[in-house]
Image (spheres, rainbow, N blue to C red):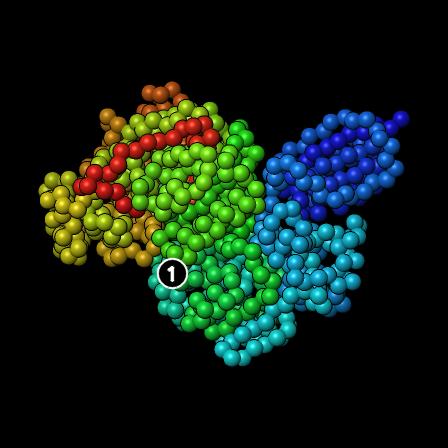
Amino acid sequence: MASACSIKVRGVVQGVGFRPFVFRLARANALAGWVLNGEQGVEIFLEGADQGLKAFVQALKTEPPPAAQIADIEIHTSNPVGCNEFTIRESRRNEQLSVRISPDLPVCEDCLRELFDPADKRYFYSYINCTNCGPRYTVILGLPYDRSNTTMESWPLDEYCSGEYNNPFNRRFHAQPVACPQCGPGYYLQAGDKMVRGNEPSIRSAVAMLQAGKILAVKGLGGYHLACDARNADAVQALRNRKYRKEKPFALMAKNLEVAGGLFQISAETKAVLTSAARPIVIAPARIALAAVAPDNHELGVMLPYTPLHHLLFAAGAPEALVMTSANRSSEPIAFDDIEALDRLSDIADAFLIGERPIARRVDDSIVRAGVFGPTVLRRARGYSPGAVAVFPSKRPILAVGADLKNSITLVVDGQAFVSQHIGDLEHFQSLQAFQQTIEDLVSMYEVRSDELLVVHDCHPEYASVAHAAALSCSEKGSVQHHRAHIASVLAERGEWKKRVVGVSFDGAGYGDDGTIWGGEFFVGSISEGFERVAHLRRALLAGGDAAAHHPVQAAAGFLAQLDGLPDMTSAPFNFPERYQHAMELVCKRVRTFTTTSMGRLFDAVAALLGFTRETSFEGQAAMWLEQLARSAPRMEPYPFPFADGELDFRPLMTNLAWDRFLGRAASECARAFQRGISRGVSDAVTTLCREHKTDTIVLSGGVFQNELLLEDLKSMLDSTPFQVWTNRAVPANDGGISLGQAALASFGRFDFVAPANSKEKAFL
Ligand code: ZN
Ligand code: FE
């Protein structure tokens, strides 16, 4: 006797070969019925023998296609309707769209085999792909995911490709971006007036230029890269000069795992991330010094090839380690449009390797570290976006617009929290445009209605994101304080809506409840009940405007002004430049100063005391420099950093450090003792607060917690306590995670209303 059941599968199940997999599985188990792509995932109806149904469900759970990510499976028994075959039906559209769009996937083993098989139709074809691999988010123009809604719409399939596309038993059945050299787009090389056409000739010419030390703009999945030979110091330096990028490390692409292993130390965890489907840039300790690639840095960021083009470049003889950095100037967003790229990069790149397939939206490479608390995403973009990172308990649509630095946005639809790709710093016009486009893009893709939408933003009155949110039409708006959003981001990732924790939120700057600049904050509470600020770093004055964040000596003035009897900072070993004295005058007169509890600025101040007295050229540079310096010394007795009455007092710590340094103690030893002091102070504070407020969990977030040495020390100190520590994993601890935290607090109505800044203490970024 026949039985029947209907099954709903949610998650990343469209555009990843799921329907043909279901089709083959049903046929193999002699089942009739149908499968279709619905708004929320894949819907299946089956009828046949009980044994076949059981085997089907078992295989559905255990052997899904490699690119699928099943979130949940719902099975209901049903009445047989007398189907006599199994079919793939047309997509259905009538409810709220919440199907998850697949992130872009690296080229698969099967496609690679064909790519290098001279007998294959797609031999040496840069755009080879199948249902298990290739572009997704970077080619999708709209939902549902069909070829007509992708950037491949203008290339009609030829007979060969459509034969595969329409065959349920073929690996390319409904592979939307499928193409071959006869019917699809190709690559060409443009060097000045010279043009090289054809896949193979253009790639071989590009390789010859790379070998000769030239700089190439190479079109990839989510934008252009600037590429050159990583071992050619002159080429790398030329790239730095032309890109106006003085010191920020460049990412590398290694030919394969073996080459990567020669560049940096690959632990088992690093290897797992490096070879994962997201193929991110992974940060790990360097094995060789590549001074021009990563100045003053003992770490390297390396990724493996992920598009067919990358594999072709290496196979054709490109240098085994390439610099592969986002094509832009300084910190502008990555270029992804051909005309824009040719225009913006013409005096950076010697030639352009251009692919004809348009990119639907810019998506940078992701950055991940296999950290002491497990793998953690430092920049969330290609390979992860726009995946859902959490399932919210409420169904209301929410748009959270994030912070102004390292911006990302979060859209919650039908409870699923989609975090956008990394957008960048909104002070740049290009990034602001990208920010607005991403909002429009996601809101229209999921057809979110503005009359139901809740919009949430930061409390900073001068954020561009806040101004933009003010202009959006929606049913309700609210603001969430920056540092509370950091803590909520960790809990939201874990789906911990009610868990009460002690949260430590350390970063450079965020607008506080009282209109001052926060950045060294302790909270108690949960997402559902909100977070109360219970402690903070001792307040200091910060002289001047935005410049204080770029000049460690300027930040140092406000902290040092509170110490008694200091050595002279303008002579050896400190040699502070004039800017310091000027800042000190402002601090003493309280003119153009701001009150801050910023832990980021404390790190800057200490970096200045230990020798970083110049201007920084990228955010977090002085703190990174300090961490590297500390790592070069053995474990030290920590400097005192006492916690009492809800305040961590930096004075004993800085006094000791300044005198030690003056008396000739090595800067590296001072740095190590400082780092240990911070960890000791924080672990004393959180254990006190956990006991006082009867919680057993500590949450760490904010950009300062990208300091791996700080995390290592904290872990070893807290391992002996009964308290557990949670950190960010799926979204960055820096401001890239803010939008998720904003959305989480907003979904429980936990908004913050802040005092406007008074004229003397106007906050700044
Ligand atoms: Zn493939
Ligand atoms: Fe922050």
**For residue 87, side relative to residue 413 (left or right):** right
Determine the residue positioned at 35% across, 31% down: 752
Location of the N terminus by quadrant is top right
- The quadrant holding residue 754 is top left
Q: Identify which residue is drawn at 73% across, 41% down.
A: 36
Q: For this view, does 90 lie left or right of residue 446?
A: right
Residue 34 visible to an observer of this rendering: yes
Residue 572 picture location, percent across and down: 15, 55
Residue 484 position within the rendered picture, expressed as x and y whole percent measured from the top left: 37, 33
Residue 64 visible to an observer of this rendering:
no
Q: Given the current orientation, which residue lies at the most extreme bottom position?
A: 193
Dot 1 crowding, Cα within 10 Å, few <14, some 14–19, many 20+: some
Q: Where 450 sits versus 17, above or below? A: above
Vertical relation: 753 (above or below) 243: above
Q: Taking 671 as reference, is 323 left or right?
A: right
Residue 103 at x, y = what percent? 58, 48
Residue 430: image quadrant is: bottom left
Quick one: SS at disc 1?
Answer: loop
In this orientation, which residue lies closer to the viewer: 171 or 612?
Answer: 171
**Mark 1 sits on what residue?**
330
Task: Tell me the amino acid under the disc marked 1.
Answer: Ser
Answer above or below: position of 90 versus 644: below
Name the quadrant where ligand 2 sits.
top left
Q: Nearer the viewer, residue 722 or 276?
A: 276
The image shows residue 694 at horizontal and vertical percentages of 38, 20
Determine the residue positioned at 45% across, 69% down. Answer: 343
